Image (spheres, rainbow, N blue to C red):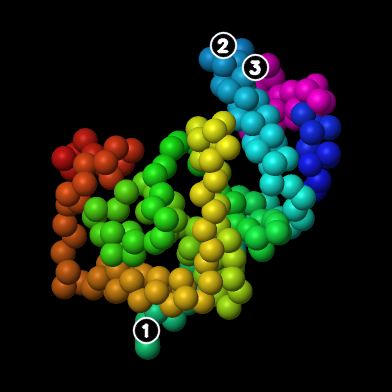
Amino acid sequence: VTPEMLKMLLKRDESIEAAIRDSFLKVMNMHEITGRNLLIKTLIKKYIRQTISFDSKIAPFDFLDSEKIVEKTVELRKGFSLRFKGIIDRLDRTADGRRIVDYKTGKGDFTVGFNYERMFSDKQDKGDAIMLQLILYAVVLDEKMADVIEPYMLRSIFKAKRYLRTVDNEVSDSFMPFLASKLSELFDKETPFSQTRNDKNCEYCPFKIICR
């Protein structure tokens, strides 16, 4: 995928419009887009055009896959293994290496490094949660290969902000003990569930009405 290809695509507005319309009708099982859905379609188009523009600035890259299902059994400690499964939004190869991309509709704050203690605690923020997800994708995809992970924060993408991070053996070796410890705690029948002390974790939880 070259910058020229993406810039040419941006000029083909009717093609983008048609692809959005066809997908919208198929997914929503509609015959016509009306009312509020017209506003949603307009917003989707805005995000798509900005994503293409963003990609044109980091091209060239090789597109490898999208909606890629990855699964792997990971031994967290002796006698305790779990099978992880996920869907990677997009996988490509750039000058930085094999890149795992995940599209996010909101905003996020990301530290320069990885704060594993906070990432696996109830003080976890949205940026921690996103990075946890992407590091886990990299581990499940291939823990022996260094990857770069990059969330596409669609509200920040208009500012051309990048949140590129590398996941290599050092990161994996640091991440896995925290993951094993947290999952061991979750599966321990003697450890009761406790309510989070971070109210932001409850913002979109479907159980917050009966819990808080």
Q: Which residue is mark 2?
A: 35
Q: Is residue 95 above or below residue 203?
A: below
Q: Residues within 10 Å of mark 2 (few under 14, many from 20)?
A: few
Q: Which residues are magenta?
A: 11-32
Does residue 159 appear in the picture of this structure? yes
Q: Secondary structure at mark 2?
A: loop
Quadrant of the snapshot with the C terminus: top left
Q: Report the residue at 29% width, 53% height from top.
A: 124
Q: Look at the numbered disc 1 and give the secondary structure of its residue.
A: strand
- In this figure, which residue is indicated by the disc labeled 3? 33
Instruction: Give the image location of residue 128, x and y in percent.
Output: 37, 54
Q: Residue at x 62, y 19 (%)?
A: 42
- As drawn, the residue found furthest toward the bottom would be 78
Determine contact: label 1, label 2, CB under 8 Å: no
> Of helix, strand and loop, which mostly describes the magenta segment?
helix
Which sits in the foreground, 202 or 96? 96
Give me the residue at 69% from left, 19% from top.
31
Quarter location, residue 50: top right
In percent of width and height, residue 78 lies at 37, 88
* Cα–Cα span, label 1 and label 2: 54 Å
26 drawn magenta: yes
As drawn, 68 above or below 211 = below
- Compared to residue 115, the image places residue 201 above or below, namely above
What amino acid type is highlighted by mark number 2?
A: Gly
Would you say 155 lies left or right of 119 here? Answer: right
Q: Give amino acid for label 1.
A: Arg
Give me the disc on residue 77: 1
